[in-house]
Amino acid sequence: MNIIVLVKQVPNTTNMKVDPLHGTLIRSGVDTIINPDDLASIELALQVKDNIQDTHIRVITMGPAQAKNMLVDLYGYGVDDCVLLSDSAFAGADTWATSYTLAKAIERYPYDLIIAGRQAIDGDTAQVGPQVAQHCNIPQITYVSKLQEITKQNITVVKSYEDYDELLSCNFPCLITALSDKTTLRDASFTMVWHADKKNITTLTNKEIQGDPHNIGLKGSLTQVKKTFVKTVEKKGQMISNDVDLAAKKIAQILKDATH
Amino acid sequence: MRQVKDIYVYIEMRNQTISQGSLQLLSLSQQLKKQYAHKNIQQQVIAVLCGYKVESFTSQCFYYGADRVIVIDNQKVQYPTTQHITKALVQIIETYTPECFLISASVVGRDIAPRVAATVRTGLTADATHLEVDPSDHSTLLLMTRPAFSGNLYGTIICPNTFPQMSSIREDVFEKIAYNNPEVPPTYVSVSFDSHDDVTVIQKIDKKKNTVDLTKANIILAGGRSMANHMDLLQDSAKQLSATLAASRGLVETQKVSKDIQVGQTGKTVRPSIYIACGISGAVQHTAGMENSQTIIAINNDPNASIFSIATLGVVADAQEVLKRIPTYL
């Protein structure tokens, strides 16, 4: 069984600061992490490997050269092969151009199952997974919270909706997207971390994947960012400092006014 | 260039009823229609209702803002499956060439919209929270604004060269408005669905019903990470104040409460009459989901907490001390 896992390196948005004057992000000093939902994807792939003999897990990421460090880390969890898609021509891609580029890379490899994270914490779009599935012309199941059963022919998973779940099955090939709040990545293996540095990372540029120059990067993007800004909120309320009783009384009054 | 016109809205059926998010989009579309009309561009709001035996739901579409309704009535789309709904919406787009196509950013919408956009090769904005028509002369562009980087930054997105201009729209950000439009006979469209199903639904599993609908709550009592050690007090207070319990991402991360009650950018969007934030610092991640509450009461022992900048009433104190005393005055 061949699995491809799509992974993205993202800025740690919890520590993110913005420049309110220019409406831009201050990127210096912000650490990068593996996108949380993508860690869930790795875990699901490892669960398949636990159950199906001869499973091969290939990780593909698109990003700058520094993303190599992330890929080295992933070898420590037991993935078999890592591919870095890196080319200045890929920069500035929206979800359409990104998914096109990823699909061109995926084409080069055999696969039964593609696993992506539901969404990345920098863009929060949740669009790349489904659009890769469309470019590869395979079915998809998004918002997968649990791997229920896996055979060599098909996969059965639990999909999480707003107020109910569904048990779904799909034949291979297909793509699923994973949720970090439902699946936690296991610890890395000491032995595999030890050997991770010696593992090979394949780097592909557009020359290798032969993407149509009109479909990649900023030029291939169908959406454009017109502007970015930081939302400012004006101070408007009354403040009570230290007088806990006055505060409790005021709050009680607001509650009583609302219910009468 | 091909002739594009009108604002189309995908109407999502959820548990045998129209999702609230879809109705909100019809009302939003009426506002966009008005903005287009100011520029002498006439658009209609068209609801695309996909489901099985859904005739009776067309009235609701007119009531909340549809000028016309297209109905795709087929057992294949009884449940919102990716494969069949995508096929139906792609056919609608190819037949009618809409100017705009809006889909709720629900689990279903966020599954289907990217697939449809990739098929017809158009740009798609995700999870927009503000939409307006570009005010500059002769422009028909939609300005689609959305939060990114966990709400730290907002981006205004345009789709200038391909059609339709597509966006998924965050649920519960816009209100549904009773337009009470006149009902005209719906247009029935037949779609040649694939005979096979790529994905088999084996079973629907109801979630354990301790889940309350936060979006309908009138009073919300929300706790931040620091309330993790005072969960009993928080729960008792919620009962006493007739409030529904909610949490910040920080509190959810301590695993004391379920993710279902998380408010914020990666949780629910709420707009209750009263929102009481206890020990919540007010990161954009959180405020993005509650800033439209009518009255915001913030209790935090850090006088510089950013939550105070949006609070109607700000209290600098330990939240547990305040909570303990409120019942005295009720």
Image (cartoon, coloured by chain):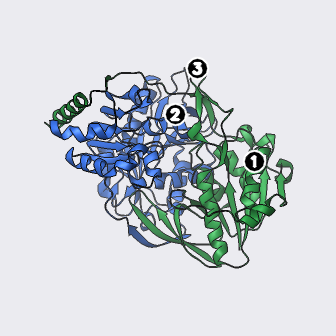
Pair 2/1: label in front: 1
Instruction: State the residue in front, B130 or B81.
Output: B130
Disc 2 sits on a residue from what chain? B
Q: Residues within 10 Å of mark 2 (few under 14, many from 20)?
A: many
Residue B69 visible in the shown view: no
Q: Which chain is blue?
A: B
Q: Amino acid at mark 3?
A: Leu
Quote the CA–CA distance across marks 3 and 2: 18 Å
Relative to A108, say whether A227 is above or below. above
The residue type indicated by label 1 comes to Ala
x and y percentages locating residue B295 in the rendered image: 29, 32
Residue linked to disc 1? A67
Question: In the rendered image, which quarter is residue A154 located in?
Answer: bottom right
First of labels 3, 1 by sequence position = 3
Q: Mark 2 — residue?
A: B145
Nearer-the-camera pick, A222 or B185: A222
Identify which residue, A121 or A111, lies in the foreground: A121
Give percent across and percent down for residue B10.
44, 49
Identity of the amino acid at label 2?
A: Thr
State the image coordinates of residue A243 (x, y, percent, origin top left): 27, 27
Q: Which mark is on residue A21?
A: 3
Q: Chain of mark 1?
A: A
Q: CA distance from mark 2 to mark 1?
A: 29 Å
Q: What shade does chain A have? A: green
